[in-house]
Image: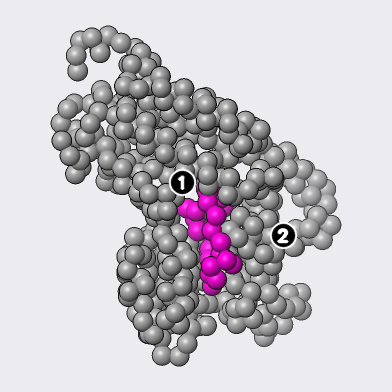
Amino acid sequence: MSENRENKTPQQAAENAPGARDHAAQAEQLDAADPLGSAVRDRFVLDDTVYLDGNSLGALPRAVPGRMAEVISREWGELRIRSWDESGWWTAPERVGDKIAPLIGASPGRVVVGDSTSINVFKAVVGGIRMAGKGCTEILVDATTFPTDGYIARSAARMTGLAVRPVEPTRIADEVTERTALALVNHVDYRTGELNDLPGITNALHSAGALAVWDLCHSAGALPVGVERYNVDLAVGCTYKYLNGGPGSPAYLYVRESLQERFDSPLPGWNSHADPFGMTSDYAAAEGIVRGRVGTPDILSLLALEAALDAWDGVAVEDVRTKSLALTDLFLDCVAAYAPPGRVRSITPYDHGRRGSQVSLECSGAAEVMAELIRRGVIGDFRQPDVLRFGFTPLYTSFADAERAARVLGEVLRALPEEDAAPGAGG
């Protein structure tokens, strides 16, 4: 690094990056025209940092603290057990499910909220196997899946006597056979941010007589999913990422209406019984999506999620998708302008049809780079061995945030020794 650059302040170095003023002006113009601008952003508790980790944990919606104070002081503190009826606790799993339903393209009565994503993956996979045709001997699993999905799929296969075959998502249409019971696929790759072809893969599975089970953790709340439009059979998702439900907030299960009568949950609990207070020894499943419940719901987290979903009032998922692509376009353009050549390489597709709402960059020394970014007020995350992840939540991420994050990244990278280039990056 030259003596002249060493003597500059970080702000001066960032402002002198190639094209900085042009990109800053562009960000300002985009923010001024943004239909999801300050009015929606103000629904969240934010500070001066650039928060680009909403693909791991969404920001706190302003409606949540007050609602939780009411739940704790009045519903729990005063009404106590009466709140199961008088405060609507008992019906919350379906009520909150109906608030999530339009965000994934579902009708009311198709989504139930409760338990963790992992438990819902187990319900969906085993329930799907039980609905599969006779003669099925295998399930396909997204070879790039989040590890837990793979662990659970293998456990479910052992329990049901089926084999597991990992397949790259782009190969599922070619690999599915009449022996396939179902495929468990991630809508967006958690590591690369690549958007998989939900309509095409679902159609290919159905053509072979198999079911489609989708993990929506990294897509719901960031882009239109269309579970009903594309005849998805079962889907699961978490609520603490783009749905901003809070740390460990309960997950959800979607079951296509025509399959609900056949859905045989591997975890039959008293909450999903047709007569839950009958306390009979024999299990009889409730009708509809209620049979996706298991035990007593986590009311505090569930009601925090319900309040968090108010941030979506008046927001169209299509507008969210438009802004998501514009945000990630700007960020990628700014990274190309600000980062020294060869220091980072995007592993997120540039093609809009293949991009979720995050940008993942390969970068040598990624852990140290992210730590320095966080120190300088840009919050993303790191995945081993060399991936920087930046998640863009359109409800509260501004274009100025995207430009600033790329600018600070360029500053950090320019301070690195020349030999620390991105893995596989050209000269």
Residue at position x 19%, y 18% from top?
1
Q: Quadrant of the C terminus?
A: top left
In the rendered image, residue 149, in percent from the top left (x then y), is placed at 42, 64
Residue 100 is one of the magenta-drawn residues: no
Instruction: Name the mark on residue 95.
Output: 2
Q: Amino acid at mark 1?
A: Ser
**The quadrant where residue 7 appears:** top left
The location of residue 34, given as percent across then percent down, is 58, 34
Q: Tell me which residue sits at (36%, 72%) in the image.
A: 173
Please name which of the two marks, 2 or 1, marks the residue nearer to the observer: 1
The residue singled out by tag 1 in the image is: 357
Query: 288 or 103: which is nearer to us?
Result: 103
Colouring rule applied to residues: one colour
Q: Position of residue 98 (x, y in %)?
A: 69, 60
Left or right of residue 394, residue 155 in this image = left
* Region in magenta: 216-242
Q: Which label's residue is closer to the chain start, 2 or 1?
A: 2
Image height of 11 relative to 73, above or below: above
Structural crowding at the residue carrying mark 2, measured as other residues with C-alpha within 10 Å and reported as few (<14), some (14–19) or many (≥20): some
**As shown in the figure, which amino acid type bears the numbered disc 2?**
Arg
Asked whether residue 247 is in view, the answer is: no
